[in-house]
Image: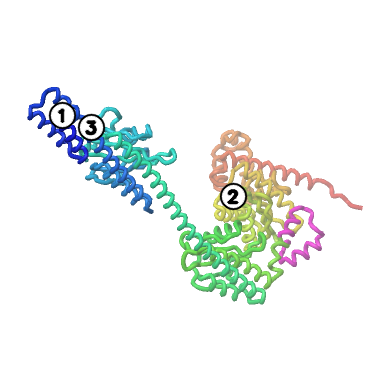
Amino acid sequence: MADEAFELLELLQKEAPASALQELLHRAGANGTSKAEMARLTRAVDLSLGIHALFARRQQREAGLAALVDTARDLTLPYDLDALLKVITRRARLLLGLAMSWVSFDDVEARCSRVRAADGHASALTIGFSVPLDGGVGRRAAEGSAPFWSADYLGDDRFTHSDVIDEVVRAEGLHAVMAVPLQHEGTGLGVLYVADRRVRHFTPDEVSLMSSLADLAAVAIEKARLLEQTRHEVVALARNTSRARDSSTAARRLGEIHCRLLDMVLRGGGLGALITEAARALGGALLVRDPSGRILAGPVGTLAEPSEEDLRVALLEAHAESRPVACGDATPHTWVAAVRVGDDLLGPLLFTADGPADDHQLQLLGLTAQLTAVTLMIQDGVAATQGQLRDEFFHSLLRGTPPPPEQIAEQARRLDLDLEAPHVMVVARVEKGLRGRTAAWASSYAHRHRGLKHVDGDRMVLLLPGTEPGPAAQAVSKELGEALRCPVTVGSAGPARGPGQIAAIHEEARRCLDAVTRLMGPGGTASPQDLGFLGLLLSDQPDVATFISDTIGPVLDYDDQQFTELVPTLEAYFASANSPSRAAEVLHVHPNTVSRRLERITELLGEGWQKPSRALQVQLALQLQRTRATLNQRHRGQPRQVVG
């Protein structure tokens, strides 16, 4: 027995395979060793096999730790994230000698986990594959924050299965699967998987080894992410630095051009020279107009002029926001800047760029518009300040406390105004927030029509030459509504003949505007003449004769010319509740006679005269006509007073 014991020790010293230890036991049995000796020898061989297995596990652990150290060294190299994940999956597969490995990251918005890298896969598991979060060993590992494995995945019922994951496992022919969570400072990054195509039970040493690899991988992944973020920030910083450098250079060049143009203006270079030099600096075409559309300078270069409507809308926006704006959809490279002094619009400055205009070009265009206004002021200082003087003069007339007539006449002469000619008053109400655009439009419109304007809160007031307040209100409503792209309510009155009537027709137009607002709502237009008998109530000096003439004038004229009885027929018809037969009884004529007279009245007044609203005005006109006739008879019957 002593010899066999020494031989076992020698075999252990030589690190002989386990089969050599078993062979010693077989030889002893063949040599006829007693049962007692054989039992002791078997015990000694079993102990030796245990020592042999212990040595083997230690060697395997040492090899695994060595491989882990090599992996840690690899993970310290600077990889981008995708390259790092490829290294991690390759090392994880080789560390335990398995068939396959992959890494998935959670996609919170899509409520799934997507495969970012894989090694050893055949076909089913590809990059970008969506792994559901409702089952599988990955879900168990993430929930427990610890590795979880299955020796035979499809036959294991310790976890919830997912049809999608089961299909992949089946397609790849996998059996043993282990999932290890990737966590960094308590935050889950994803899951590292390893798998084999045979049934396999993972030892505690293997699980611990994979857990250590996952810890190293999580740190490396976070480092790679930070490195990638830093790289992007450095690139963005370099790009911003380059932009800032370019912007500084452009700003310096812009300042130099502005100084050169300003010096040209102050030296009396004139508007034409200014526009020519500015067009060269802008790299496009320039054109200056006055408010009536007359060209003041240019075009310098090939100019793509927009439509009048697009130009009007763009000019109002440029005036209101104090910046150049693009003009129209058909000419995307045409811009408009407002040449103005305060609220007074001197005209548009049009610029057509060779391509999309940048910020510095638009800044230079705005500066050119300012210099254009300065040039116009230098060329004609009176004209440049005339707008403000006209506004102040008009405001004093509207207040109803004008200066003496001699002073009014002198101011009107200096401002080139003929207030003795008939003028109509137009008052418009616009939406809040559009005051700037309204003031710009009013300035242009008053200039074009040789009138006066005033903007008071949400009301715009215009005094325009003419005798027809109704058409003037409609024209203002249409053009201003198109320019502001919203309904405009307008009331008008007049005409006024002389400065003394301006305040009165202004109040009348305001009352008309309030009535239109209540009767018609936004977008309505009317003058007192358009409102019929309501206009009589709104007017300071009701024109009864005009109302009667507009309402039943053709009937009165027909009676005077043909010596007929249409007016008495109308009165009897209304007094009889619109009954021709009862009217015939009152008039002592045949009903057919009344019918023929009513047909004649329809020919004279139109088809709608019997409608309620129109019939009311006809009855009021008849009553006023009868009252006038009675008063005239009384006046003629009174004795003439003698003034002593």
Q: Where is residue 436 in the image (x, y as percent from the top left)?
A: 63, 55
The residue wearing badge 3 is 50
Q: Could you tell which of marks 3 and 2 lies nearer the N-terminus?
A: 3
- Check whether the beta carbons of the residues at disc 2 and disc 1 lie within 8 A of each other: no
The amino acid type, in three-letter code, at marker 2 is Val
Q: 346 or 504, which is in the foreground? A: 346
Residue at mark 1 to residue at mark 3: CA–CA distance: 20 Å
Is residue 558 in view from this perspective? Answer: no
Q: What element carries label 1?
A: loop
The residue wearing badge 2 is 488
Q: Using a 10 Å C-alpha cutoff, classify the residue at mark 3 as few (fewer than 14 neighbours), some (14 to 19) or many (20 or more).
A: few
Q: In this view, does 401 lie above or below 448?
A: above
Question: What stretch of residues is rendered in magenta?
Answer: 391-419
Q: Tell me: 183 left or right of 284.
A: left
Q: Could you tell which of marks 1 and 3 lies nearer the N-terminus?
A: 1
The amino acid type, in three-letter code, at marker 1 is Met
